[in-house]
Amino acid sequence: MQPTTQESPPLDLDAYLSRIGYRGALDPTREVLDALHTAHVHSIPFENVDILLGRRIRIDLASVQAKLVKARRGGYCFEHNSLFVAVLRRIGFQVTTLIARVRFNQSGISPRSHMLSLIDLPGGPLVADVGFGGPGLTRSARLVEGERQPQEIDVVSFRREGSSLWVLESRMGEQPQDLYAFTLEESYPVDYEVANHFTSTHPGSLFVNNLIAAISTPEGRVTLRNRTLGVLHRGQFERVELDREAIVGVLRERFGLELPADAQLACPGLAAEGG
């Protein structure tokens, strides 16, 4: 049972469905879950631009609706998954919210700083995560050990570590890479507020130090890290180094982010690349 909290602002489900271009059924089934999950990751980009503009990241429902839906912006895991969980619960899914330690591109133990969710369906529990921003889930994945589960371009699987830890792996080839590790202990909004404060303000945070944007497509994925644009399309990967002056245009054209032409994006990652 969830702890008693103040009543949340209403979810504008119609506006969300319009934002992701979804016009299908709205029943609490695996098929609907996957259709919503895929439509979301194809429509709403992962991005941390507001941090680099000195703006506070708010993860309450009213704020994430205003930003991701009304303003047609993107966000990172707490924003994406808070919105998606609200949608799933409105439709009637039984959802447990979880928190993970990211292992992707990490050399040590990272803080618990990634939000995901567990969906309880008659066929067994499913993991949903629309806010990872890299190789990961474009549809839900069954929480079973060792089963290779195709996504749109990746294959994922789960493995157990010890008695309580689950690890999500991604395979672009035969060599798996860990994405993140989590337990099934439920997390609550206050847990995400603490993690969000660290992620958006700590001087050692990935998102304070780098410009990052990503979006999945039916044929691949587009990513931007500082001035490096990577495009994966039908198995072919292209990397382009950008002039700093081109970044705002790329954010608009590739990720649908409308920023002022004079937006000053500042972070150590951009400065280190001579921007």
Image: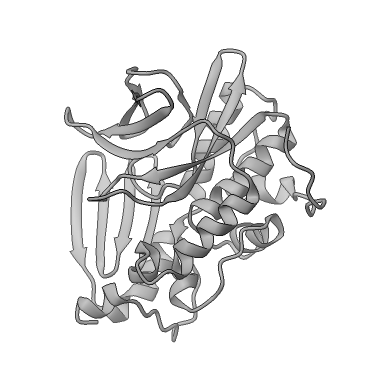
Residue 263 lies, in percent from the top left, at 45, 82
Q: Quadrant of residue 151?
A: top left
Residue 109 shows up from this direction: yes
Looking at the image, which residue is at 45% across and 22% down? 143
- The residue at the far right in this view is 7
- The one of 109 and 227 positioned closer to us in this rendering: 109
- The residue at the far front in this view is 163
Residue 74 shows up from this direction: no
- The quadrant of the image that shows the C terminus is bottom left
Residue 16 falls left or right of residue 253: right
Q: Vertically, is 156 above or below 65?
A: above
Looking at the image, which residue is at 55% across and 50% down? 80
- The quadrant of the image that shows the N terminus is top right
Q: Quadrant of residue 206?
A: bottom left
Q: Vertically, is 186 above or below 198?
A: above
- The residue at the far bottom in this view is 262
Residue 190 falls left or right of residue 5: left
Residue 159 falls left or right of residue 38: left
Residue 69 lies, in percent from the top left, at 63, 57
Looking at the image, which residue is at 71% across and 59% down? 62
